[in-house]
Image (tube, grey):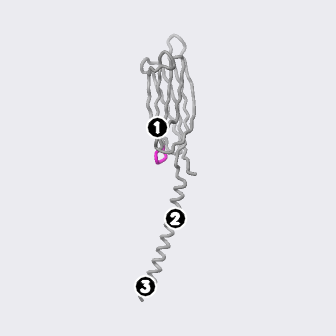
Amino acid sequence: MTQVRTMKRASALFALVMALVLVLSALGASEADARKNRATASRVTTFATIDGLDDEIFTPDERCHIEDSTEVVLRNSVPRKLMYLECKWGGEVRVELNLNGRRFNNGSVLVTGVARLYEGTSEDTQDLDGEKDFSISVPKGQTVNIKQRVENTDEGGDFADIDMSFHNAPVKRR
C-alpha cells in the first residue's frame, strides 16, 4: 500500500512537473515573442508649413510661405530636435519654428515647440514681437495634426499661421 501511494504521488508529481514545464515554455515563448516585437524606437515624421503676413498700411501686405519635412528616430527619453524652420519676408519680418521630440517607454512621443515672430528694421532683427509655446502628444502608430498662430503682440497686424503634422511609427529591433 505504501508503494502504491508512493507511485501515485510520483505520477502526480511527474504530471505536475510536466504541466509546469509546458506552461513555462509557453510563457517563455510568448515573452520572447513580445520582446522581439517590442518597438525600441520611434520614427517621427514631421511636416510643417508657415504662412506669414506682414500687415502694411500704405503698400500691399507682404507674405511668406515655406514648408519642410523631416524624419528623426528617437531611441530614448532624451529630447532631440525634430525641426527648425525659418521664414523671412518683407525685409523686416522673420518667424522661427523650433520643434523637439521626446520618446516615452510606452512608445508615445511628446512634441514641444516654440514659434517666434520678429519684426524690426531687417529680417535679421532681434526685436521679438510675438511668441507661442505649445506641446502635443503623438501616440505610437498615429498621426496628429496641429495648427498654431503666432501674432505680433507689440505693434499688431503681423502674424504667421503654422500647420504641423507628426507621425509616430514604431521602429522594431532587428
Position in image of residue 46 (x %, y %) = 54, 36
Q: What amino acid is labelled 3 in the image?
A: Arg
Mark 1 vs 3, N-terminal side: 3
Q: Which residue is mark 3?
A: 5
**Residue 146, above or below 13:** above
Which residue is found at the position 53% from the left and 35% from the top?
Answer: 165
Position in image of residue 18 (x %, y %) = 50, 73
Q: Which residue is mark 1?
A: 136
Position in image of residue 6 (x %, y %) = 43, 84
| Marker count (numbered) | 3
Mark 1 vs 2, N-terminal side: 2
**Quadrant occupied by the N terminus:** bottom left
Q: Secondary structure at mark 3?
A: helix
Circle 3 residues within 10 Å: few <14, some 14–19, many ≥20: few
Magenta-tinted stretch = 104-108
* Mark number displayed over residue 120: none
**Residue 80, above or below 26:** above
Q: What amino acid is labelled 2 in the image?
A: Ala
For the view shown, which residue lies furthest in the top direction?
58
Mark 3 vs 2, N-terminal side: 3
For the view shown, which residue lies furthest in the bottom direction?
1
Which residue is found at the position 51% from the left and 19% from the top?
Answer: 123
> Foreground: 101 or 132?
101
Magenta: main secondary structure equals: loop
Circle 2 residues within 10 Å: few <14, some 14–19, many ≥20: few
Q: Secondary structure at mark 2?
A: helix
**Residue 143, above or below 35:** above
Q: Seen in the image, is 7 located left or right of residue 66?
A: left
Q: What amino acid is labelled 1 in the image?
A: Ile
* Mark number displayed over residue 26: 2
Position in image of residue 143 (x %, y %) = 53, 40
